[in-house]
């Protein structure tokens, strides 16, 4: 039978046996080639089982066809154990039910795809939680945690996953089911008890005693004095024995209140040596990180390294007293105790994002050369030593790094002696890979010398399993192989991991990427102009696969709407990686698979700020569309909405007539069909008088400039100019109230947003160059941009598309939002006191590129109370108007924006600075929302609020008529 015949037979058999999805197409395979590790394997296909019966059926079919199986949860494993060449079982799509939660017994019965945070939310009303909490708690699954024996920051109090598992139901290769518990041998594979009984001495002496010993199989759990505990022995087996179909886990009592003591130390070693001394005070966490991992102090006390020590109590006062007791016992440089939940979350976010931020190591300037960043990778991510040995171990670890010419930024669970670190291995060259192997071998020797474990949290996978004989010796490792064979005699469960592992320098995911930079349009300044480097930024930690709390983030709205991996930032990055590799996706920039995945990307730019490693999928999408449609016919929406500025300039003189025609339903329907616009959408109303025409008439009536330092250029963006000129008029009133005079760039300026978002990059560059020419002598002066998406384009896309034109960086640096300008250039101006509540949304581009701190402060000064929602409105410029996007657009709006507006109290003003956000609210909720400038202008009295003074000879207004 040929490979293709075998594949066809397998697909046919799986499709007949399984009710869930059976996917063997290029997209499904490409999405599963990698986890969060350095490794890559191409699977045959993916099965998303609907229930335990589907899992058993899949295992039976795969055994009959001699095809291996890889169970996969959230795909955040960092040692390669969630990759494989056979059939990947995607347990996250359907198996996400909490079957039972017994608060009295403090247990929960869960399916393997349950997200940890979902379980914690379900337990919270009962005052309970699941103790282990890795930093990926918002997207990791219970099945994956059991497979890796995950731990998290609270393990000093509540232990590892294995410590919190009561019983497991598992399906073996072939489909038979076993029930594993504690204190009995029932459910054990034939021969397992005999294997344990014949090696009792080795099991009692061969395993180091330390809190974070995750490496290898936990065979010591089979000792008679420990149960035997079959469920514990199964935990950490990395999918090599069987598949968890259901788990009974123990819950712990969550403290009513918590306090966070952040202790500052001179350096990392001082913090490490102090950590064990804090354990007798029974903290909930003792986490450590050094200054070389922190970009901004963000409320941290003085020091070169910090311990994050969390305490609990029945009341906030009790939790704080506990924290202060620890503070008094610690010898610190500086310290702070935080009881405010928002303040604690902000500090914890620094620690939790470390797995991503550590992938870029920032170097200081040397000999006048600016500092920069280098890529850093997992591989020796989570070794653990006895906590008392952590200080000396870290010093020797730093020495070993230096000896190999490597850099890394350690952080992690200092109270448990477990350290995470990303190291700037060169995994692209033969010499670099050879050094990676030499370092790994010497590192294993160092860890063992300190009585440690090669893995202290995330498992061995392919990264470390080859080196297990250095830790356990040949006899015990041979016993691991026999243990594996009793569970999986056919060797079909995740082969190449733990027992008889693959080499640690095989299957590296970088091997398949182009060896030379790809010809691209954007400059990619943070990746040395290399598109491959930009794509490989994604390390798979999957923060994009989670929902954000209101007001806290944007990424990734399309994933939250669909729940599909291909519509996450990580999924799209994986597809681009495979496009560059050319093995699974073979038609490069013409790829239909990549195009379809990017089609539902809203270009919200949320990943640019929310992704820990700064993946910028909006830019990658524009780049891809540019190449994909080069020399080809584009979708109608690209010609209509992608070239909106030109069409609106032509339409402006005929606005009343066009508005009247748009109200005739058959004509509107025909226009939308021809333009590629969703039938459900209403065509926006064109302004009867554009903002620039209003400004020109106003100038002719006698508006005169103040002195040059009080002149500000207001950008007449397409949306403000043609669709919401009331925003521009309001902004001018506010600026005048602050003692400023507004002037405007010459006719024809445009940021190029619509061309960029549709991938018409050649046209975008021409528009941008013309804009730079038209700015003339005002280039570099403060530029107030009222539409956040246009401001973000000028700030970010302009210099990245025209990196060789110094004027682009100059213009980008001059961009301010209205609030930013007022705060910086009119700090003494007092806005009108409005004293009423507001709701609405911070524009996604503002969140990602510009930030909204100035807006928050301005709202506070004006007495506008209330938090704005995060997320994305779902309209996102042309996205929500395009045919085929209506459902996702509405789902995105329903995720945060619409609920926040519906729940607002009567009399609440709805704020939305973006035209798209205001349009979405009007069309989906019938709600009128306004720009912040409009609310402020409403509170002002009178019209012209400053005296007429002589014109400035330095800067005169450019013609601004249409």
Image (spheres, rainbow, N blue to C red):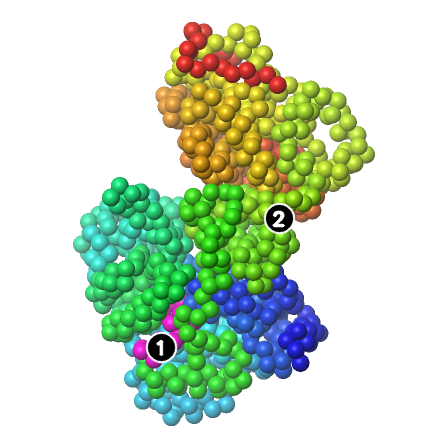
Report the disc number at residue 299. none
Residue sitting at 54 percent across and 80 percent down? 492
Front-most of residues 776 and 728 = 776
If the image is split into quadrants, where does the C terminus sit? Answer: top right
Left or right: residue 899 compared with residue 828: right
Residue 458 image offset from top left, x and y in percent: 40, 67
Frontmost residue, 72 versus 903: 72
Residue that appears at 50% across and 51% down: 518
Q: Quadrant of residue 133?
A: bottom left
Image point (44%, 75%), residue name: 502
Mark 2 neighbour class, 10 Å CA radius: few under 14, some 14 to 19, many 20 or more: some
Q: Quadrant of the N terminus?
A: bottom right
Identify the residue position indicated by label 1 in the image: 468
Q: What is the x, y in percent for residue 139?
A: 49, 59
Range covered by the magenta-colored residues: 455-471
Residue 503, percent from left and from top: 41, 74
Q: Position of residue 956 (x, y in %)?
A: 47, 13
Identify whether 173 is placed above or below 32: below
Q: Residue at x 48, y 85 (%)?
A: 485
Q: Is residue 242 magenta?
A: no
Q: Is residue 459 magenta?
A: yes
Above or below for 698 versus 576: above
Find the distance from the CA under tag 1 to the CA under tag 2: 47 Å
Q: The residue tagged with tag 1: helix, strand or loop?
A: helix
Q: Is residue 396 visible?
A: yes
* Left or right: 309 as drawn, with respect to 496: left
Magenta segment, prevailing SS (helix, strand or loop): helix
Residue at which label 2 appears: 628
């Amino acid at each position: 039978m040929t490979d293709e015949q075998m594949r066809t037979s397998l697909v046919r058999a799986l499709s007949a046996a399984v009710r869930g999805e059976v996917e063997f197409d290029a997209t499904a395979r490409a999405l599963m080639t990698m986890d969060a590790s350095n490794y890559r394997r191409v699977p045959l296909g993916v099965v998303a089982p609907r229930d335990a019966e589907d899992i058993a059926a899949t295992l039976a079919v795969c055994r009959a066809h001699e095809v291996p199986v890889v169970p996969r949860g959230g795909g955040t494993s960092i040692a390669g154990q969630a990759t494989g060449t056979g059939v990947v079982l995607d347990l996250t799509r359907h198996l996400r039910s909490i079957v039972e939660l017994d608060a009295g017994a403090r247990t929960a019965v869960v399916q393997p795809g349950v997200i940890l945070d979902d379980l914690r939310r379900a337990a919270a009303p009962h005052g309970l939680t699941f103790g282990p909490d890795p930093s990926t708690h918002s997207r990791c699954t219970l099945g994956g945690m059991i497979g890796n024996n995950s731990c998290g920051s609270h393990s000093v109090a509540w232990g590892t996953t294995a410590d919190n598992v009561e019983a497991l139901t598992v399906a073996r290769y072939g489909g038979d089911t076993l029930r594993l518990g504690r204190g009995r041998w029932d459910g054990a594979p034939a021969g397992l008890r005999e294997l344990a009984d014949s090696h009792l001495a080795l099991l009692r002496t061969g395993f180091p005693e330390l809190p974070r010993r995750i490496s290898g199989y936990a065979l010591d759990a089979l000792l008679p004095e420990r149960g035997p505990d079959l469920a514990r022995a199964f935990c950490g087996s990395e999918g090599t024995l069987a598949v968890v179909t259901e788990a009974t886990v123990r819950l712990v009592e969550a403290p009513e209140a918590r306090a966070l003591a952040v202790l500052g130390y001179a350096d990392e070693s001082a913090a490490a040596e102090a950590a064990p001394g804090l354990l007798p005070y029974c903290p909930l966490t003792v986490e450590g990180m050094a200054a070389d991992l922190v970009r901004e102090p963000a409320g941290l006390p003085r020091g070169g390294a910090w311990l994050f020590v969390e305490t609990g109590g029945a009341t906030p006062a009790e939790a704080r007293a506990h924290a202060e007791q620890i503070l008094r016992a610690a010898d610190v440089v500086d310290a702070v105790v935080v009881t405010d939940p928002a303040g604690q979350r902000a500090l914890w976010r620094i620690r939790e994002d470390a797995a991503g931020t550590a992938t870029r190591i920032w170097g200081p300037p040397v000999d006048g050369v600016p500092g920069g960043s280098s890529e850093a990778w997992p591989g020796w991510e989570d070794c653990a030593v006895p906590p008392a040995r952590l200080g000396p171990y870290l010093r020797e670890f730093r020495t070993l790094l230096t000896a190999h010419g490597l850099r890394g930024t350690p952080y992690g669970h200092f109270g448990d002696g477990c350290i995470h670190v990303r190291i700037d291995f060169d995994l692209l060259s033969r010499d670099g890979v050879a050094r990676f192997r030499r370092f790994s071998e010497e590192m294993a020797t160092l860890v063992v010398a300190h009585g440690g474990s090669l893995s202290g949290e995330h498992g061995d996978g392919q990264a470390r399993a080859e080196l297990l004989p250095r830790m356990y010796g040949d006899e015990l490792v041979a016993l691991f192989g026999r243990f594996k064979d009793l569970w999986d005699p056919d060797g079909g469960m995740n082969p190449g991991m733990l027992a008889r592992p693959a080499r640690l320098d095989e299957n590296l995911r970088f091997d398949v990427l182009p060896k030379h930079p790809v010809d691209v349009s954007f400059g990619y300044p943070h990746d040395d102009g290399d598109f491959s480097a930009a794509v490989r930024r994604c390390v798979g930690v999957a923060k994009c696969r989670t929902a954000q709390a209101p007001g806290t983030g944007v990424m990734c709205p399309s994933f939250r709407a669909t729940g599909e991996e291909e519509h996450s930032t990580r999924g799209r990055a994986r597809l681009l990686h495979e496009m560059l590799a050319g093995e699974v996706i073979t038609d490069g920039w013409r790829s239909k698979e990549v195009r379809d995945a990017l089609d539902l990307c809203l270009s919200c730019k949320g990943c640019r700020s929310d992704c820990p490693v700064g993946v910028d999928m909006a830019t990658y999408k524009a780049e891809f569309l540019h190449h994909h449609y080069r020399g080809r016919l584009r979708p109608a929406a690209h010609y209509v909405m992608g070239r909106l500025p030109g069409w609106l300039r032509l339409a402006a003189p005929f606005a009343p007539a066009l508005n009247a025609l748009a109200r005739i339903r058959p004509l509107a329907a025909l226009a939308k069909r021809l333009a590629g616009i969703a039938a459900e959408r209403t065509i926006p109303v064109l302004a009867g008088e554009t903002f620039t025409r209003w400004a020109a008439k106003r100038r002719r009536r006698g508006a005169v400039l103040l002195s040059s330092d009080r002149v500000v250029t207001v950008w007449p963006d397409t949306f403000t100019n043609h669709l919401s000129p009331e925003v521009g008029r309001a902004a001018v009133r506010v600026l005048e109230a602050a003692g400023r005079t507004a002037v405007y760039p010459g006719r024809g300026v445009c940021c190029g947003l619509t061309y960029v978002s549709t991938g018409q990059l050649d046209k975008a560059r021409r528009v941008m160059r013309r804009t730079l020419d038209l700015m003339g002598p005002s280039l570099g002066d403060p530029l107030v941009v009222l539409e956040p998406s246009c401001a973000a384009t000028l700030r970010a896309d302009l210099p990245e598309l025209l990196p060789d034109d110094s004027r682009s960086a100059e213009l980008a640096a001059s961009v301010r939002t209205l609030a930013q300008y007022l705060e910086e250039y009119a700090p003494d101006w007092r806005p009108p006191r409005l004293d009423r509540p507001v709701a609405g949304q911070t524009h996604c581009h503002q969140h990602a590129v510009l930030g909204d701190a100035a807006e928050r402060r301005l709202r506070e000064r004006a007495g506008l109370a209330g938090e704005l929602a995060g997320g994305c409105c779902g309209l996102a410029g042309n996205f929500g108007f395009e045919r085929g996007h209506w459902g996702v657009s509405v789902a995105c709006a329903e995720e945060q924006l619409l609920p926040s507006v519906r729940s607002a109290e009567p009399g609440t003003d709805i704020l939305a600075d973006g035209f798209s956000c205001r349009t979405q609210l009007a069309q989906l909720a019938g709600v009128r929302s306004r720009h912040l400038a409009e609310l402020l202008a409403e509170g002002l009295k009178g019209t012209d609020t400053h005296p007429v003074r002589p014109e400035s000879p330095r800067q005169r207004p450019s013609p601004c008529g249409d």
